[in-house]
Image: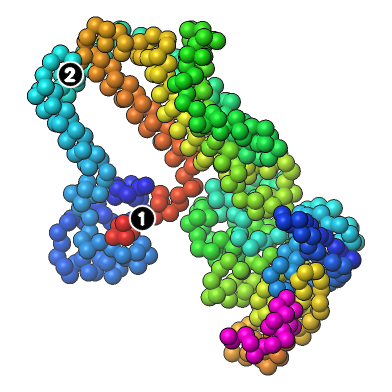
Amino acid sequence: MITIQGLSKSFTTRSGERVDALRDVSLDVRENEFLTVLGPSGCGKTTLLRAIAGLVPWDDGDIAVDGAPVRGPGPDRSMVFQNFALLPWATVLDNVAFGLRMRGVGRAERVERARSFIATVGLEGCEAKLPGELSGGMQQRVGIARALAVRPRVLLMDEPFGAVDEQTRRLLQEELLALWEEHRMTVVFITHSMEEAVLLGDRVALMSARPGRIAEIVPVRLPRPRSRDAGGVARSGEYAEITAYLWERLRDMHAEHRPDRAHRPDKVAS
Amino acid sequence: MFRNASTRPNTTTPRSATTPRRAPTHRKERRSGHGTQAGPRPARPAGPLRRFLDMNLPYQLLTFAVFATGWELYARARGGLLLPGFTETVRATAGLLGEAELWRALYVSNQALVLGFALAVVVGVPLGIALGRFPLLERYADVHLNILLVTPMAALIPLLVMSVGVGTASRVVLVALFAVVMVIVNSRAGVRQVDPALIEMARSFGAGERTVWARILLPAALPAVMTGVRLGLGRAVTGMVLVELLMVSDGLGGLILTYRGLLKAPQLYGTIAVILAEALLLGAVAHWAERRLTRWTRPNTSRTRPARSQR
């Protein structure tokens, strides 16, 4: 579905330092797969997503969606943003319809489709509200509805629940899972939370920082539909196992960047 | 902003039906039923008096009354032809409003004001937006803009009159010069403040450069642009009067000079009062327009009720 081969991108910081945001990243995302990308901050996972979205150029390598090389943003992909990126002057309805408007969908159909997706994310009755009148969780529901409204083949989610509180995050995760059960599509989901990566993903692409690389792809063979309820996968031993393993790997990556802690852990406390 | 109770539409209690004094039991019922989402409640439901005291107007009127009384007392104690009291000024102002001389002056002055201010907006808004969007342009213009920002504009008046002449043109140019800096600086700030995530969002849905301008940049910059226009209008009025006072003896400034020459102190004060009234009126209109166009910048104050006890 999405084929990424030898993707590299570097940039120069203001201080003149050259940073490899991505180095030789190769990744295959399967049709209707939910892939989560996990890594320490600054590992280039957002850059990877923006490259797939066609929003940033890269230095080397190829990205193709369904065999068609990515040259820029396209109607087959849509994105959900970390800080929602809603137009503060536009109503919920207009925000959800924004993507459709960009794609040249006529007014009547735009409104109808926007309304149906507003209902999908459970925001009926909020059509005329402004984003500033909604809570963070509701705002991101608008962001998700906007992305779904254009009926993409690939949904790109950039730490979509990173800016909401823990309780809201859990609610949104469960809603996203239910939504995905109903409308299967290919999802690339960036996160820095091990639990989120495991709960949502079919596979977890673990990235390391500086240079940004895929360190390992961890399959999550937990049955779906998944939930946190009693008997749900989030309470299973395997879930805990994978989460713990991911954390071990991440902790090692963090340690690599702090040699003093890696070699003399006994000195950390002082 | 909307602190006065009368402008809060979505209050959870039917406030018009409540009176200041209520039986305690009744009050309790009311509060337990409604008061959870809008924060802490005042101990008593607001009545007409409470609402009146919540507005800014009574306090403003009070300070004005103190000022007017002080003025009147000082003028009476000091006496003399050159210092009219408050009441005398009010009478003179009313008298002036019936004279063609004043209306002619108003017309002449406002001609320069309207033309100059329009020029400032037409030039300043696009220029400011361009400066905010294109850093290269900014490199050329930044230092000049700063000079314009700190220069006492009044010092430029003689220079301008000498180079442009004493006609309407020099007054228009001066009004524009006074106003344009505010318009440019605020428009520039408005475009700079636009959240880059919004632009990226639009691009991700396939928006081109023109669409990004029309759907993201311009609407997002509008509040700051409107602030610049409002501040610029205030400066334009200043420029209008200054140029007439200092160089081109015409319009309202000219009228002030005439009354001063004739030692008609009450009329002199009256003219100033008219200028003040115009400035206040224009300011109010600009403020209203700004609020109308940028309602989305304060969804929480214009639609839901702020908790009074926290202020």
Look at the picture and state if B125 lies above or below A10.
Answer: above
Q: Residues within 10 Å of mark 1 (few under 14, many from 20)?
A: many
Magenta highlight range: A249-270
Q: Chain of mark 2?
A: B
Q: Chain of mark 1?
A: B
Instruction: Find residue B110 and report its image quarter.
Output: top left
Query: Which residue sits at x=55%, y=36%?
Result: B185
Q: Which residue is mark 1?
A: B305
Look at the picture and state if B218 lies above or below A60.
Answer: above
Look at the picture and state if B250 lies above or below B143.
Answer: above
Residue B99 or residue B251, whichever sits in front: B251
Q: Main secondary structure of the magenta part?
A: helix
Look at the picture and state if A110 lies above or below B100.
Answer: below
In-image side of B134 versus A214 (left or right): left
Query: Which residue sits at x=58%, y=76%?
Result: A170
Quick one: quadrant of the N terminus of chain A? Answer: bottom right
Query: Residue B277 placed where, x, y %?
Result: 31, 25
Q: Residues within 10 Å of mark 2 (few under 14, many from 20)?
A: some
Residue B283 or residue A87, whichever sits in front: B283
Residue B115 or residue A256, whichever sits in front: A256
Query: Residue A174 placed where, x, y %?
Result: 61, 76
Instruction: Find residue A19 and report its image quarter.
Output: bottom right
Query: Residue A227 placed where, x, y %?
Result: 63, 82
Query: Which residue sits at x=54%, y=47%?
Result: A89
Q: Are marks 2 and 1 on the same chain?
A: yes
Query: Residue B111 placed where, x, y %?
Result: 45, 14
Residue type indicated by callout 2: Leu
Q: Secondary structure under badge 2?
A: loop
